[in-house]
């Protein structure tokens, strides 16, 4: 037997739940379907369990896309202050960390529970653990077939995310649906993800695992000043996660270690003050000891700094301020926080997220080719795009 709704939303993540609540509040009969057995798993594990739910400094510049202006409309229509106001209505306390990042004081579960209540209050029908076997366009809208029921609706919202963190149930189903309806897809890849070393580099840097150091890392015109972490697989930490969204296979990263320090001035001063020091001794005053030893060994100068020529000093400074590292790859979707690429924004209306070719079909959240920086930006895109579609679906 077929059951009729006004809106069917595929995906009960951040964007899907926001869209469902907003559409339901408009009086629309809304059904949310998800194959996962639990609600909002990506929300639950985000931000170390506290959910970095937005950022105070959101702008289109914080997002990657083939069309960097596409996100402006949705982000303007639902801003960080709007989500903060929603948290206030549910008495959810939060705090700001560095760089405008906002986190729950308590558990990320509070965000999930809030969105769940929003949907229930709006009369949304939520069905988890539901496998979708077919989706098709009908004369009156859309038909979604599950293992035990057929549903129909005027509007269909695809909010099932990207491929990142498959243990939460992530798949490429949203992209398959887009292609089924003739929409173009921008090639996808893991983003906000640790990068890996080649076997040779792993051997060289094995002793540095666990060391963190402030860096300025750049690639393809993008640059981030944050901490970098050496791991037993390669490089991680906020700086590397950020630049990974821009990095392409085979390219090098340029690292400036301790960007707040003028190593040229520091080394020359040490030459004058205590010239009998070894290179690693001078470097260890500013860098973790093991990293200082590694750089000194790789530099290959075994004399004291008093005997270093100006050319030697310049060469050492170049190592510290423009160190080239070529990752072998990334850890992939298994640990990626988000998927880069997705449904081509040229296929969608920027104000409503509705497909230009297919009336009543919407794509929101991570499935769209809009990828935010680390720091709450992707959640804000989820809230904003879900809200935009929920207003009209």
Image: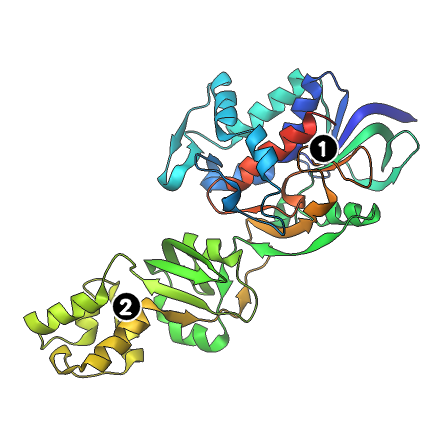
Q: Quadrant of residue 154?
A: top right
Q: Give above or below for 342 relative to 246.
A: above
Quadrant position of the C terminus in the picture:
top right
Describe residue 307's horizontal placement relative to residue 325 as left or right: left
Q: Residues within 10 Å of mark 1 (few under 14, many from 20)?
A: some
Describe residue 254's horizontal placement relative to residue 177 as left or right: left
Residue 182 position, x and y percent, is: 82, 48
Describe residue 308's horizontal placement relative to residue 349 as left or right: left
Decide if residue 39 is in sight here.
Answer: no
Which circle marks residue 128 in the picture? 1
Label 2 sits on residue: 290
The one nearer the camera, 145 or 77, is: 77
Which residue: 44% across, 72% down? 202
Which residue: 42% across, 24% down? 93
CA distance for labels 2 and 1: 50 Å
Q: Secondary structure at mark 1?
A: loop
Q: Quadrant of residue 231?
A: bottom left
Decide if residue 209 is in sight here.
Answer: yes
Q: Secondary structure at mark 2?
A: helix
The one nearer the camera, 118 or 71, is: 71
Q: Residues within 10 Å of mark 2 (few under 14, many from 20)?
A: some
Residue 227 position, x and y percent, is: 36, 54
Count of numbered badges drawn on the protein: 2
Residue 111 position, x and y percent, is: 53, 28
Pick whichever of labels 2 and 1 is earlier in the sequence.
1
Pick out the residue farthest to the front.
Answer: 69
Q: Quadrant of residue 157?
A: top right
Q: Give above or below for 69 relative to 96.
A: below
């Amino acid at each position: 037997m077929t059951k009729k709704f006004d809106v069917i939303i595929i995906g009960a993540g951040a964007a899907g739940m926001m869209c469902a609540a907003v559409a339901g509040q408009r009086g629309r009969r809304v059904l949310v379907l998800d194959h996962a057995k639990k609600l909002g798993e990506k929300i639950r594990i985000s931000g170390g369990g506290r959910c970095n739910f937005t950022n105070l400094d959101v702008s289109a510049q914080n997002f990657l896309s083939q069309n960097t202006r596409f996100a402006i409309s949705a982000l303007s229509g639902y801003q960080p202050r709007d989500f903060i106001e929603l948290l206030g209505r549910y008495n959810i306390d939060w705090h700001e960390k560095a760089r405008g990042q906002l986190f729950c004081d308590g558990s990320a579960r509070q965000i999930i529970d809030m969105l769940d209540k929003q949907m229930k209050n709006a009369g949304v029908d939520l069905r988890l653990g539901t496998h979708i076997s077919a989706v098709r366009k009908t004369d009156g809208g859309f038909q979604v077939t599950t293992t035990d029921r057929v549903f129909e609706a005027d509007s269909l919202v695809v909010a099932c995310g990207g491929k990142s963190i498959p243990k939460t149930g992530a798949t490429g189903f949203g992209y398959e649906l887009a292609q089924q309806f003739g929409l173009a897809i921008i090639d996808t890849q893991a983003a906000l993800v640790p990068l890996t070393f080649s076997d040779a580099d792993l051997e060289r840097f094995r002793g540095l695992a666990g060391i963190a150091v402030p860096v300025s890392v750049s690639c393809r015109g993008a640059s981030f000043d944050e901490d970098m972490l050496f791991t037993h697989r390669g490089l991680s930490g906020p700086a590397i996660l950020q630049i990974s969204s821009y990095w392409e296979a085979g390219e090098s990263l340029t690292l400036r270690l301790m960007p707040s320090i003028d190593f040229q001035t520091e080394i020359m001063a040490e030459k004058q003050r205590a010239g009998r020091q070894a290179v690693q001794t001078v470097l260890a005053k500013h860098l973790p000891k093991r990293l200082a030893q590694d750089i000194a060994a790789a530099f290959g100068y075994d004399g004291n700094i008093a005997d270093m020529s100006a050319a030697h000093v310049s060469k050492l400074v170049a190592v510290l301020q423009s160190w080239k590292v070529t990752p072998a790859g990334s850890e992939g979707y298994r640990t990626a926080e988000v998927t880069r690429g997705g449904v081509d924004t040229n296929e969608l209306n920027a104000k409503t997220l509705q497909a230009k070719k297919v009336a009543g079909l919407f794509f929101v959240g991570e499935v769209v080719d809009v990828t935010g920086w680390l720091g709450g930006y992707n959640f804000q895109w989820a809230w904003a795009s879900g809200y935009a579609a929920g207003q009209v679906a």
